[in-house]
Image: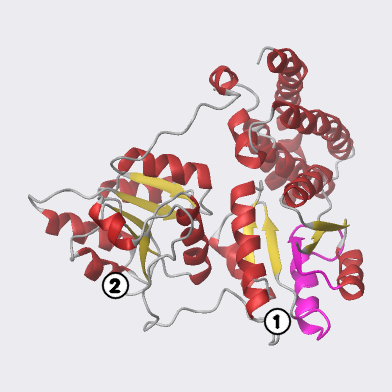
Amino acid sequence: MARILIVEDNHANMKLACLLLRNAGHTVLCATDAETGLTLARADQPDLILMDIQLPGMDGLAATALLKQDPVTAAIPVIALTAMAMKADQEKTRVAGCDAYIAKPLRYQELYVVVDTLLDNGARQAASAARSIYPAVAATAPTVAAEPSGASPTREEARRNGQLILVAEDNETNRKVIGRQLTLLGYCADFANNGRQALERWQHGEYALLLSDLQMPEMNGYELIETIRAQEKDSRRMPIVVMSASSSRQEFNRGRTAEMDGYLPKPLQLMELKATLETWLPGAAPSPQSHFGSLRRSTLGQAIDVTVLEDLFGDDPSVILEFLTDFRFSAGKIAEQLRTACANHHPLAASEQAHKLMSSARAMGALSLGELCETLETAGKAGRSETLAALLPMFDMELDAVNDFIDALPAQVVGH
């Protein structure tokens, strides 16, 4: 298996990444700052690097640029880790030379797909200079079906069974990742590089479902959906699920107006994709009940969403409890530093601590706490000490709720 370097300053995120990669059989090297990461990369020549973007001192983008400029390390694939899944962040990572990016919190299915894709590319191109999997897609690029493996049906079998999927996506990296995810889930798909190609393929009438990006050249996703709906008329209505890196309500509402059936945020999470396909495709098998099924129902609207943890590293209760216990300890230390920064009227320092806790809180399913941390981070960056002071009591109440949930968890786990 591969030797992978992780450059990450957040203890909870580092532990999670190490666990996921070691469970996959990889050897892990660790660095908590960019300078140490650069030194290890040059000395140990890992097969792949996971690079956090928000690092103390030199940030991950600057470190990646240095790696790609150094002939000794230029061929090592770099995956950027970012707490924000925005198109602007993806563009920044591409310019810096990153080969792919993953939004935090890490999910094991997505991480494995991206890591395997880059390692496979590296094995095929070991004798040549590294090439990013972000290149611009030419308008004449071929449209190909996802390569089936294992239990995945052939294209003809999928078409005959009414389960052939059409994916409209202009980004090559996203196409590769989605293709691997669909193959893992046992589906077969054809891919189009833009809305116009997707429309031409749909007009053959073979597809059971369309997965469509919204921002595409030639014909965007909204135009594609509207055109398909207008041409369907009295024929069978095909389910359409849109994919977008934006979480704006305006974009969601516009997609709904265009008569989409479902919405998936990018980067796609394997279990969310699976559930969506099971909803809209005929004959898809429902997911088995998880070990945490009853606990999941009890946590809706509460401090921690256990389903987030299951998406990260499966549904082993002991692993979930271990990570939440570690998070409780580290969150307490960060919260103390955050309070100190607010009391001393150091808004930028408060912003840094809020960002650090936001990332790990979201990874552990403490979503409301993560949202509060994001608000605190924004206020701190703007230098608004009064806003920080006003938000701090709400932060303390939410952190107390998270701690109470974690303290009660062992008894619930034993009940399983």
Residue 305 seen from this side = no
Pointer 2 residue: 197
Q: Earlier in the sequence, mark 1 or mark 2?
A: 1
Asked whether 106 or 394 is in front, the reply is: 106
Q: Residues within 10 Å of mark 2 (few under 14, many from 20)?
A: some
- Is 21 drawn above or below residue 386 in the view shown? below
Task: Left or right? Give the position of 35 relative to 68.
Answer: right
337 drawn magenta: no
Please name which of the two marks, 1 or 2, marks the residue nearer to the observer.
1
> In this orientation, which residue lies closer to the viewer: 141 or 318?
318
- The residue identified by callout 1 is 126
Q: Position of residue 177 (x, y in %)?
A: 52, 61
Q: Quadrant of residue 71?
A: bottom right
Magenta stretch contains residue 55: yes
- Viewer can see residue 224: yes
Quadrant in which the C terminus appears: top right
Nearest the viewer among 405 and 131 is 131
In 3D space, how far apart are the residues under numbered discs 1 and 2 (Cα atoms)?
33 Å
Picture layout, residue 153 above or below residue 131: above
Q: Amino acid at mark 1?
A: Ala
Q: How is the image coloured?
A: secondary structure
Residue visible at 79% across and 76% down? 67
Which structural element holds mark 2? helix
Percent coordinates x, y for residue 224 in the rendering: 26, 62
Residue occupying the point 40% across, 53% down: 187
Indicate the position of residue 165 as horizontal and vertical percent values.
Answer: 33, 56
**Magenta span covers which residues?**
45-74
Secondary structure at numbered mark 1: loop
- Asked if residue 308 lies left or right of residue 60, the reply is left
Q: Is residue 90 left or right of residue 326?
A: left
